[in-house]
Image (cartoon, rainbow, N blue to C red):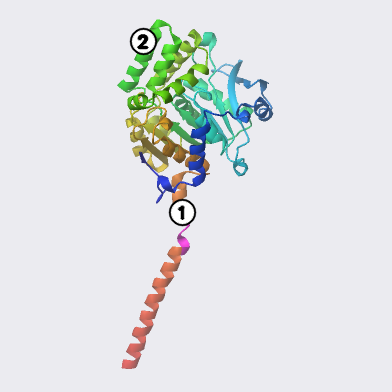
């Protein structure tokens, strides 16, 4: 795994708390659920201005350029009291998942983030007749959720489709996004992406939603992983199948979201430049959705504020690879800190000024002694 880290720090130097959190959550996330994570009361208490029904927020916002106010129902799962009480004052996180995914599909990210910061997972609302809504509209929904939760600033963590939504929010509301994590954000212009979408649409020709979802899960995992860990793959598939109804509506949602991703052309250096804050990027080099070449270009152009981790052998769901634990631990480092790694580097250098001052005084003292000795010798000569 190749990555950018703080000066002098390796993966093994990570704080024990992050590594332990990743190990513990990986081990028990399938065996237990956290009742607080889906508590409607916690969400409703924070969302005092929202109409709530279970864990559904009905948010009202202006759409387009007209004055009509449209009610949008957005499903959210919230955990607003982090496990570690000392971190409760940190900027909260909005977690944005990938195509067709919810907390029940892949709970690891939600569980880990909830230990450090208040977090809500926003599921994507549908348009009329269950049509998929645009990336820009989904981004506006995320900001509306933050408004109802009274969050003036927030951190965005997005996976795949969610990374595109996060980018859209960062472009349009840069002052509100403290930092942004882009996980497995695909390059929709790459032939590999087009082939993946074409294969998923072909899988839907039989109108078999389970076959489509199985193909979607397969596209998120590398070939060697599927061959080496069939039971693990089956567990991922079973969670995916159980989290949503296997019907035509689900198929329509998945394919519609893929089409909206293909239509979003901002995943390039010019698009990322519109967001001025720190960016943390994780991408597997075996991601079937698209290779990480576009993210390498991003890191090269915006090196001063971009962290890039390329996880060797990992697919779209990078945390299921052998190197995934290390990558996830690095992401938690980024989320835990209150500023960007590059800002911390600068502050670290500035923090060494007393050392530099002492060295300068020592050098001056040395030359002063030499000058005194030379003056004394000249005086004796006369």
Disc 2, SS: helix
Q: x, y (%) of residue 124?
A: 53, 20
Image quarter of the N terminus: top left
**Does 172 appear in magenta?**
no
Disc 1, SS: helix
Q: Nearer the viewer, residue 90 or 133?
A: 90
Q: Is residue 129 visible?
A: yes
The residue positioned farthest toward the front in the image shown: 231
Q: Dividing the picture into quarters, in which one does residue 11 lie?
A: top left
Q: Nearer the viewer, residue 164 or 373?
A: 164
Q: Is residue 155 visible?
A: no
Query: Taking 301 as reference, is 128 above or below it?
Result: above
Tell me what residue is drawn at x 55 percent, y 25 percent: 122
- The residue pinned by badge 1 equals 348
Query: Taking 83 as reference, is 167 above or below it?
Result: above
Tell me what residue is drawn at x 45 percent, y 26 percent: 164
């Amino acid at each position: 795994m190749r990555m950018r880290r703080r000066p002098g720090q390796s993966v093994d130097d990570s704080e024990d708390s992050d590594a332990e959190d990743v190990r513990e959550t990986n081990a028990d996330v399938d065996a237990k659920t956290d009742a607080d994570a889906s508590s409607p009361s916690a969400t409703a208490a924070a969302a005092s201005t929202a109409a709530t029904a279970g864990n559904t927020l009905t948010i009202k916002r202006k759409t387009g350029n007209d004055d009509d106010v449209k009610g949008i129902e957005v499903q959210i799962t919230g955990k607003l009291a982090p496990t570690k009480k000392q971190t409760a004052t940190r900027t909260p996180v909005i977690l944005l998942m990938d195509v067709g995914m919810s907390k029940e599909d892949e709970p690891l990210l939600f569980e880990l983030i909830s230990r450090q910061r208040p977090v809500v997972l926003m599921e994507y609302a549908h348009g009329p007749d269950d049509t998929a809504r645009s990336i820009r509209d989904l981004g506006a929904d995320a900001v509306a959720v933050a408004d109802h939760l009274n969050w003036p600033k927030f951190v965005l963590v997005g996976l795949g489709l969610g990374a595109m939504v996060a980018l859209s929010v960062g472009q349009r509301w840069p002052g509100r996004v403290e930092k942004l994590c882009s996980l497995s954000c695909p390059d929709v212009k790459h032939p590999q992406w087009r082939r993946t979408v074409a294969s998923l649409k072909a899988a839907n020709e039989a109108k078999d939603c389970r076959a489509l979802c199985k193909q979607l899960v397969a596209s998120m995992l590398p070939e060697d992983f599927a061959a080496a860990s069939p039971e693990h793959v089956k567990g991922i598939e079973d969670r995916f199948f159980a989290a949503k109804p296997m019907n035509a509506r689900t198929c329509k949602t998945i394919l519609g979201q893929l089409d909206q991703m293909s239509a979003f052309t901002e995943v390039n250096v010019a698009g990322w430049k519109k967001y001025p804050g720190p960016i943390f990027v994780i991408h597997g080099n075996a991601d079937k959705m698209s290779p990480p070449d576009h993210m390498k270009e991003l890191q090269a152009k915006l090196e001063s504020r971009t962290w890039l981790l390329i996880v060797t052998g990992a697919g779209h769901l990078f945390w299921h690879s052998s190197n995934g634990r290390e990558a996830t631990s690095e992401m938690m480092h980024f989320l835990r800190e209150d500023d960007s790694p590059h800002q911390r580097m600068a502050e670290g250098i500035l923090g060494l000024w007393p050392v530099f001052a002492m060295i300068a005084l020592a050098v001056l003292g040395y030359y002063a002694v030499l000058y005194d000795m030379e003056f004394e010798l000249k005086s004796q000569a006369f």
